[in-house]
Image (spheres, rainbow, N blue to C red):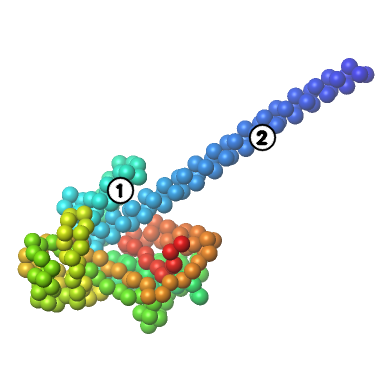
Amino acid sequence: MKFRNVLLYNRYRNILIQETKRYAGHSKWQNIKATKQENDSAKSQIFNTLSNKMKVAAIESGNPDPNTNPKLANLVGQAKKANMPMSTLKGILEKIKNAQTGNTHILPMHITKGPTFVMHIVTDKFLHVKCNIMHISKKFNIKVLESTAFSRLFDCVTTVTASKDCNLDSAMEDALIANAIDVEQIEDESGMCFKFKSEFLHPEKITTQLKNLGYTILSTENECIPTDVVEVTEQELLNINKFKQKLTSEIREIVKIEDNIASP
């Protein structure tokens, strides 16, 4: 009887040890898997951010060629440093090159008692795109904001960055001729240049004049700068990032999304 008990004990002991090892291995695999998913998610977010910035740099300047678009070239360099696969990078540049052209629109949206978002959209079918955005936004409880309320929350400007062999005094005189709102001297990837402020969403009103005055247009940018910011929790920020990622991945006409969320 004692011998039989010893056999049973050893048998179940071995089974217990094997099960323990199996679950330990399973737990290790789960940890590795979770770490990989976290790294892949972070990498994907970086790639999506760079992709959107490249799209903006190409569309707002009207130049999808990184060889002649310094801002786009700089972003391509950042993508390579972030180890973006060449096939992915080439695919992004090809999509940008073949991107649909159209008018630039903005669509302000907000969360009740929360932050406001500004969708920058380039399309000739704005109402169709707007419906698609609203369909996705409804799932996140985000609604369209009235323009009157939006105007109190953001200061919107369009800037034109251009270069010319001259000083700031000459650029200021040229700004008056081109009917620009303001001008400042800056330094970017291409060296010293000038940033002219134009009527929001209508840079063409001064770009033609600047070209006639001998300037090389480097880029244009539409910006909505918040006049007041809103604090959000970590969980709210996580949901907001999911919302933005879903929009930009499914609606290619969105070139960028701005907001009035306070910096962490």
Helix, strand or loop at label 1? It is helix
- Residue 175 in picture, x, y percent from top left: 13, 73
The residue drawn where x is 29% and y is 57% is 55
Q: Can residue 243 be seen?
A: no
Q: Nearer the viewer, residue 80 or 176?
A: 176
The residue drawn where x is 9% and y is 70% is 170
Say above or below: 185 vs 86: below
- Residue 127 in picture, x, y percent from top left: 34, 72
Neighbor class of circle 1 (other Cα within 10 Å; few <14, some 14-19, many 20+) is some
Q: Nearer the viewer, residue 80 or 254?
A: 80
Q: Can residue 82 be seen?
A: yes
Residue type, numbered disc 2: Tyr
Total numbered labels placed on residues in the image: 2
Helix, strand or loop at label 2? It is helix
Question: In which image quadrant can residue 6 be found?
Answer: top right
Q: What residue is pinned by disc 2?
A: 23
Q: What residue is pinned by disc 1?
A: 78
